[in-house]
Amino acid sequence: EKGERLNSMMDGTVTEVGYSDDLGNYVVIKLDGSSTGVDNGASIKYGHCDTINVEVGQSVVAGEKVATVGNTGKYSTGPHVHIAYDGDGDGNYCSNTAADNPMNILYPGY
């Protein structure tokens, strides 16, 4: 539902807060390699947020509120969260590389 709490999935640092037509209000969190085992600039992007509750440079821990669910962006058709994973730190969240498969952090050794 719109306005529901959106928590950070992992420890990290907020590197970007912004708006795009595709994702509406979004936040990017670069993952903390010491807590995730991922130490190559990997990040998670949360899109279509209603409100953003963090700012660039802020450290966050898993479970911390970072935003609320929304319906922002030119193409959004209802309240939801778009989550994208950049596993190799190249800034591309949609590549077909194995590194960008979120199964790598959800199920290590996948």
Image (cartoon, rainbow, N blue to C red):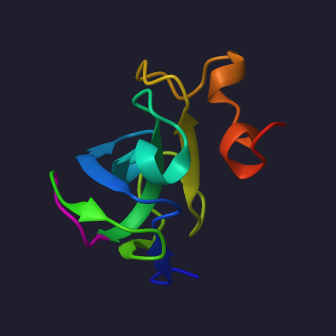
Locate residue 35, reporting x and y percent: 48, 54
Residue 66 vs 88, above or below: the answer is below
Q: Which residues are magenta?
A: 52-56
Residue 67 vs 100, above or below: the answer is below
Would residue 51 be found to the left or right of residue 35 on screen?
left
Which is more toward the observer, 48 or 106?
106
Residue at x 43%, y 48% (from the top left corner) = 34
Would residue 21 be found to the left or right of residue 84 on screen?
left
Locate residue 55, reporting x and y percent: 17, 60
Q: Is residue 89 magenta?
A: no
Residue 54 vs 48, above or below: the answer is below
Where's the C terminus, which quadrant? Answer: top right
Locate residue 7, reporting x and y percent: 47, 72
Magenta portion: prevailing SS class: loop
Which residue reaches farthest right?
110
Q: Quadrant of residue 103?
A: top right
Which is more toward the observer, 22 or 61?
61
Q: Say whether residue 89 is visible.
A: yes
Residue 61 vs 20, above or below: the answer is below
Q: Quadrant of residue 97?
A: top right
Residue at x 26%, y 72% (from the top left corner) = 53
Which is more toward the observer, 3 or 27?
27
Would residue 17 be found to the left or right of residue 94 on screen?
left
Q: Is residue 54 magenta?
A: yes
Q: Say whether residue 23 is visible.
A: no
Locate residue 104, reporting x and y percent: 71, 38
Residue at x 38%, y 51% (from the top left corner) = 24
